[in-house]
């Protein structure tokens, strides 16, 4: 199922195999992702390619400064003919949500996603509604240096399992993009290859991936180091610890293993932990958080035990 999904997405997205793998990892682990990069880098195209590959409900929310929280969640509308209020569901009632340019909306509207991302539910006029599974938010944003943007608050950032950047393409990769899009957009011909039941089945399998004690301690050593680093005002929370653990299990599953190795943890530490750090004053330059995580990885000793020993059978 993983190969069918990655092969289908690669018909549209060129040269981003690791980003695609991380996005699938986030979906299987039940987390959400934030794609940050300059306009035109393929963020929306990647999100729509994943959505088109799954037979699941998809909705896109275009975030703008005048967007209201009720435009996301929905609201009760009075039916004059029947004399009752009826719920008009918003776009949040879907399986895959593309929150496009999320940082162009005001903080009040951004906060409208908090409950749904964390608790898989929305509250409208005091009534709580459960959201269908799988529920996967793919948010895109332009760098905060871009005019007309509102930086996401720490509480919002912490709800994202990973923060990813598309990055640039090599000369040959960009030439391949030109060839692929010469006549028409391949996204328009993309068909679904998996169902939402397949996603839930993969999620259940990933939950059973074995994590040895040594690897669990390695995860905690990395997270603890973020709290003690001289350049960090607030390190990763316990939510960050659990996020790294669950992401590592899903990453191992996507890699074809039923146990986690230290390399899984180190590969995920930057995308899972960097955006959760609050840096000390004067250290807020772009990419500083990722640099701190990389320094911590260099200084943290990897376990060398047998990573399958003690696994329940």
Image (cartoon, helix red, strand yellow):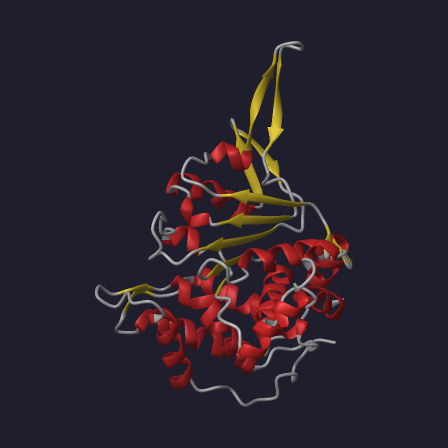
Where is residue 23 shown, x and y percent of the image? Answer: 59, 64
* Quarter of the figure with residue 67: top left
From this view, report whether residue 113 is shown above or below residue 309. above
From this view, report whether residue 52 is shown above or below residue 268. above
Spot the residue most to the bottom. Answer: 304
Spot the residue most to the left. Answer: 282
Q: Quadrant of the C terminus?
A: bottom right
Would residue 15 be seen by someone viewing this image from the given angle?
Answer: no
Q: Residue at x 65, y 63 (%)?
A: 181
Q: Quadrant of the N terminus?
A: bottom right
* Quarter of the figure with residue 252: bottom right
Would residue 66 be seen by someone viewing this image from the given angle?
Answer: yes
127 with respect to 277 (left or right): right
| Nearer to us in this view, 113 or 13 | 13
187 with respect to 108 (left or right): right
Where is residue 40 shown, x and y percent of the image? Answer: 50, 59
Where is residue 216 shown, x and y percent of the image? Answer: 52, 75
| Nearer to us in this view, 183 or 65 | 183
Spot the residue most to the front. Answer: 183
Where is residue 53 shown, x and y percent of the image? Answer: 72, 57
40 with respect to 28 (left or right): left
Q: Residue at x 51, y 67 (%)?
A: 166
105 with respect to 147 (left or right): right
* Quarter of the figure with residue 122: top right
Q: Residue at x 51, y 64 (%)?
A: 242
From this view, report whether residue 88 is shown above or below residue 251. above
| Nearer to us in this view, 174 or 217 | 174
Count all numbered tags in the image, as a single digit.
0
């Amino acid at each position: 199922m993983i190969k069918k999904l990655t092969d289908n997405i690669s018909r549209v997205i060129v040269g981003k195999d690791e980003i695609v793998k991380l996005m699938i990892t986030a979906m299987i682990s039940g987390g959400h992702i934030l794609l940050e990069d300059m306009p035109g880098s393929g963020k929306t195209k990647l999100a729509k390619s994943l959505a088109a590959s799954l037979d699941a409900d998809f909705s896109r929310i275009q975030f703008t400064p005048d967007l209201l929280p009720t435009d996301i969640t929905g609201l009760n509308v009075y039916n004059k003919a029947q004399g009752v209020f009826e719920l008009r569901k918003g776009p949040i009632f879907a399986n895959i949500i593309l929150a496009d340019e999320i940082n162009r909306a005001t903080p009040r509207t951004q906060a409208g996603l908090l409950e749904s991302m964390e608790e898989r539910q929305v509250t409208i006029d005091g009534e709580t509604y459960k959201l269908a599974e799988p529920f996967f938010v793919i948010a895109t944003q332009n760098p905060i240096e871009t005019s007309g943007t509102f930086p996401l608050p720490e509480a919002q950032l912490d709800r994202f399992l990973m923060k990813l950047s598309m990055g640039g393409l090599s000369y040959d990769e960009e030439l391949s993009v030109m060839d692929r899009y010469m006549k028409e957009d391949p996204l328009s011909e993309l068909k679904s290859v998996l169902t939402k039941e397949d996603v839930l089945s993969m999620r259940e399998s990933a939950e059973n991936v074995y994590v040895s004690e040594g690897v669990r301690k390695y995860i905690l050593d990395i997270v603890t180091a973020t709290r003690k680093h001289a350049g960090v005002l607030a390190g990763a929370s316990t939510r960050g610890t659990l996020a790294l653990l669950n992401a590592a299990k899903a990453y191992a599953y996507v890699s074809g293993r039923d146990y986690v190795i230290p390399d899984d943890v180190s590969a995920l530490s930057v995308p899972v932990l960097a955006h959760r750090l609050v840096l000390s004053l004067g250290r807020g330059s772009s990419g500083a958080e990722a640099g701190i995580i990389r320094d911590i990885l260099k200084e943290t000793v990897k376990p060398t035990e047998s990573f399958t020993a003690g696994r329940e059978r």
